[in-house]
Image (cartoon, rainbow, N blue to C red):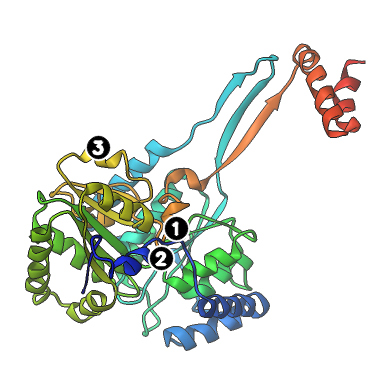
Amino acid sequence: MKILSTQSIDDACALARLNRRYAPGLEVEQLVAGILADVKTRGDAALVELARKFDHVDLTTESLRVEPTEIEAFTDPALIASHANVLAFAKRGLRQDWQMTNAQGAEVGEIYQPFGRVGIYVPGGGAPLVSTVLMTATLAQAAGCKEIVVCTPCGRDGKLNPQMLVALKLCGATEIYQIGGAQAIAAMAYGTETIRPVDKIFGPGNKYVVEAKRQVFGTVAIDLLPGPSEIMVLCDDTANPAFVAADLLAQAEHGHDGEIILVSTSSALIAAVQKELQKQLTHLPRAEIIRDTLEHRAWLIETADLHEAITICNRYAPEHLSLIVRDEAAAIAKIRNVGAIFLGNYSPVATGDFVAGPSHTLPTGGAGKSFSGLTVDQFQRRTSIVKFDRAALEKTTPLVQRFGEIEGLDAHSRTASIRLE
């Protein structure tokens, strides 16, 4: 593990690299561009070949789709509780239509309507991320989207995890396709013989999925850039080292380019966390995956004070921030670039991953400087409404005419004055 100090000149370059903005890298960018072009050109045939190449699974054009009607109802208390919390939280965030009268007497306002057809990507790989279904599709359900299209990679047996299917049914998925990677993003953006294109794409994924979302933006809307999982624990000496280590190990368990960082004002706390990491690691089934993260993508950083720690946080823009300090309110007021904040010793990040209520789909890789986490209003389209009567137009026409003079657009001015002649 990399142990750094803000007081060390030798560590300055390493710390500077934590000042991130999303950047895919040329190799990833070119590989994804090729996949997108292939799917756009050859449709289903490309999806079948790419599934064999990257996921090592033999699919046919007929087996790409899983019919929701084939899924048996299943009541798992954890899934039901999570769905209920996420749905309740989402409904509080729905934007409502509104109207007002402006200074000249015109009626203006906004209306919000759900996207008609949305696409949701759910990662597969090493673990069946049932929670990601609940944290994405439930929001589409709350917004009232009529068509909820989900793409997720199947196992090498050509089948999806049964509990994944149950969660999809619970959240109202209307179409399910067992395809993954950048090719799934391409299918939802461009459409194929089997999959009709969607209006907007949501959901996290690996670096190839994230880059694919970036490249299809404009052809289709996207939510944000949520990639491999990452956590920063920012704490003083009030933190419990065992709890901190457990949170770091939990996110390291994802593997796949995820990162874990501890930033603390206490050298004693950092030393205690190191011991706890080694102690707890011996009991975890995914220890090899975690060790790889600890060796290559983990940092323990000692700072002179809380101000330095918060500066590092804002530069890094972590997906998850566990904040354990004496004065939470003062620290939160200075924190700008994070996906989600978990406060105190008794708020493990896993509660947000699974059941708390807010979506766990959050910006990663430095994208938190430009994006917020997934919210239900991103499943709504905003439309502005404008209505003038004659009296309001009479008051407004001189203003329109003046703008026409300024911008040299006489025809614009005429659209108002002709109505009063």
Indicate the amino acid at tag 1: Ala
Q: In which quarter of the image is the N terminus?
A: bottom left
Q: Which of marks 2 and 1 is nearer the N terminus?
A: 2
Residue at 42% over, 51% down = 374
Residue 330, numbered circle: 3
Q: What element carries label 2?
A: loop
Q: Classify residue 108 as left or right of residue 395.
A: left
Label 3 packing within 10 angstroms: few (<14), some (14-19), many (20+): few
Q: Can residue 51 be seen in this view?
A: yes
Q: Which of marks 1 and 3 is in front?
A: 3
The residue to which callout 2 is attached is 227
Q: Classify residue 81 as left or right of residue 138.
A: left
Q: Quadrant of the C terminus?
A: top right
The residue to which callout 1 is attached is 367
Q: Are marks 2 and 1 in contact (CB under 8 Å)?
A: yes
As displayed, is residue 409 above or below residue 157?
A: above
Q: Nearer the viewer, mark 2 or mark 1?
A: 1
